[in-house]
């Protein structure tokens, strides 16, 4: 059996997925043309080639600029699901949506969220992919704006919106999770789940992961790779069972790391941490949750057993309710058993 025959269809969650990055390159170029938004190039190969994270953020912000109407938002939402169902067995996804990118363009919270929810609900009905939304704090903005954003989320309850997370970088290009402590405290007091980007790059630190865990009291961490440089914190994370939504391919661009068996994600798994795989910014890093399993997983020196564990860990780390988790577990287990039976028969 080729690894690919197992890793492509194995059922998957994706927890760490920035909504704008589910837009295809073709759609980005088409919308940029329609609205007269300047792109550095209209060659998709060159458009998504970056030198570093700051370079990537320029392209990412241009992509938010081409989303102007409800129709644009709903179409991007629906199409993003279709691509990953066909290519990679996606069954459940959590989207990070950053309203602070859209407010200055006159697109308010509900004007942004309602069409996205419409598009994702249609995709759930047609394609069987459930979803939740995590509202992302734009780290470019001051802490007072983050607090205001959480107040907006609480004043506009929407069933699929279940948590608070993060997007972008601070103006100093740092993570600085402690800066948003008030926003996180308010979110937690009102029962929202929380996640934070921490410990992503070589310039970031295990301390940033510690702040997210001990001071923000998050339910899960996005990235978190630098944690393995602090054995005591790693042991604490293992004992608490906190989940890490990792994104292997993006580390080759944002951290300059090679995906191999010495990679920090592999070391996190070996240390017994709860780890799932996501694409982070699929279109912009020219990846997908499918590619993370098919290509990154074997490069990390991991096998079929690990793939099953990573697929199921994605359900543990999800922010949906317990009934949804139970039905996802039943579905994943049945699909994995059927896949195992096919392999055994072949
Ligand atoms: Zn991210």
Image: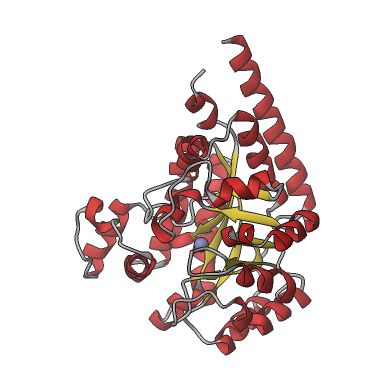
49 vs 166: above or below: above
Residue that appears at 75% across and 57% down: 235
User: Residue 40 appears at what percent x and percent y?
Assistant: 21, 65
Left or right? Give the position of 73 relative to 132: left
Residue that appears at 53% across and 68% down: 113
Left or right? Give the position of 299 relative to 35: right
Q: How many marks?
A: 0
**Residue 181, picture quadrant:** bottom right
User: Residue 210 appears at what percent x and percent y?
Assistant: 68, 70
Q: Is residue 103 visible?
A: yes
Looking at the rendered image, the quarter that the C terminus falls into is: top right
User: Residue 278 appears at what percent x and percent y?
Assistant: 53, 50
User: Residue 166 appears at what percent x and percent y?
Assistant: 55, 70
Residue that appears at 74% across and 47% down: 325
- Considering every residue shown, the one lying at the far top of the view is 345
- Coloring applied to the structure: secondary structure
**Residue 23, picture quadrant:** bottom left
């Amino acid at each position: 059996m080729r690894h690919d025959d197992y890793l492509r269809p194995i059922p998957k969650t994706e927890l760490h997925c920035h909504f704008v990055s589910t837009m295809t390159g073709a759609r980005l170029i088409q919308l940029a043309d329609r609205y007269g938004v300047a792109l550095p190039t209209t060659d998709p190969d060159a458009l998504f080639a970056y030198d570093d994270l700051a370079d990537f953020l320029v392209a990412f912000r241009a992509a938010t600029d081409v989303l102007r109407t409800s129709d644009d938002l709903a179409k991007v939402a629906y199409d993003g699901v279709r691509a990953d169902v066909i290519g990679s067995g996606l069954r459940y996804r959590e989207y990070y949506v950053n309203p602070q990118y859209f407010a200055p363009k006159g697109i308010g919270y509900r004007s942004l969220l309602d069409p996205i929810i419409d598009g994702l609900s249609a995709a759930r009905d047609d394609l069987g992919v459930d979803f939740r939304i995590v509202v992302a704090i734009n780290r470019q903005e001051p802490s007072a704006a983050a607090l205001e954003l959480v107040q907006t989320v609480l004043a506009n309850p929407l069933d699929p919106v279940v948590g608070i997370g993060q997007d972008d970088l601070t103006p100093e290009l740092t993570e600085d999770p402690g800066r948003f402590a008030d926003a996180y405290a308010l979110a937690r007091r009102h029962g929202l789940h929380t996640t934070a980007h921490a410990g992503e790059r070589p310039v970031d630190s295990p301390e940033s992961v510690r702040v997210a865990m001990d001071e923000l009291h998050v339910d899960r961490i996005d990235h978190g790779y630098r944690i393995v440089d602090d054995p005591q914190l790693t042991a604490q994370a293992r004992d608490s069972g906190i989940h890490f939504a990792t994104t292997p391919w993006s580390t080759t661009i944002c951290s300059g790391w090679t995906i191999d068996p010495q990679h920090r994600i592999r070391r996190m798994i070996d240390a017994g941490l709860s780890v799932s795989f996501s694409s982070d910014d699929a279109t912009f890093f020219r990846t997908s949750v499918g590619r993370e399993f098919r290509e990154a997983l074997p490069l990390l020196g991991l096998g079929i057993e690990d793939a099953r564990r990573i697929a199921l860990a994605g359900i543990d780390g999800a922010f949906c309710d317990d009934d949804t988790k139970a039905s996802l577990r039943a579905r994943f287990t049945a699909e994995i058993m059927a896949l195992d039976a096919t392999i055994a028969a072949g």
